[in-house]
Image: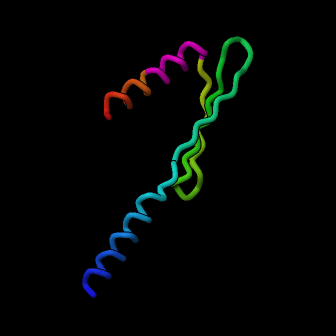
Amino acid sequence: MKNSILILLLLFSINTFSNKEKCITIEEEKLPNYKVKVIKTNHCVEPKEITVAVYIVTEWEKKKRKKRKSRKNDK
């Protein structure tokens, strides 16, 4: 009986942790004159938090590279 309860509890915990959805989504939109409009939406907060920023293409690419590099180093 104990084993079956433990197995059910373990399965339930694995299920809840595996269904994590991404909180932040980032959309890129190209604008004229070598600019990029970045819309960042946070879905985890109750009123959705939307941030809009405009970058020069080279600046945005540099930020993306830096983010990828830091993510790669964390693993």
In the image, residue 65 lies at what x, y percent?
46, 20
Magenta-colored span: 56-65
Quarter of the figure that contains the C terminus: top left
- Image quarter of residue 8: bottom left
Q: Residue furthest left?
A: 2
Report the residue that reaches farthest toward the right.
Answer: 32
- Residue nearer the viewer, 57 or 5: 5
Q: In the picture shown, does residue 74 fall above or below 23?
A: above
Viewer-proximal residue, 74 or 9?
Answer: 9
Task: Give me the residue at 31% from left, 82% from top.
Answer: 5
x and y percentages locating residue 20 in the rendered image: 47, 55
Count of number-bearing discs = 0
Q: Position of residue 38 (x, y in %)?
A: 61, 30
Any magenta on residue 64?
yes
Q: Relative to 46, does residue 51 appear above or below in the rendering?
A: above
Q: Quadrant of the N terminus?
A: bottom left
Q: Which color scheme does this rendered protein use? A: rainbow
Seen in the image, is 34 located left or right of residue 3?
A: right
Residue at (57% x, 47% y) in the render: 49
Magenta segment, prevailing SS (helix, strand or loop)? helix
Q: Residue at x 49, y 17 (%)?
A: 62
Residue 53 position in % (x across, y down): 60, 29
Q: Is residue 2 magenta?
A: no
- The picture quadrant where one finds residue 67 is top left
Q: Front-most of 46 and 68?
A: 68
User: Looking at the image, which residue is at 40% across and 71% down?
Assistant: 12
Residue 74, picture quadrant: top left
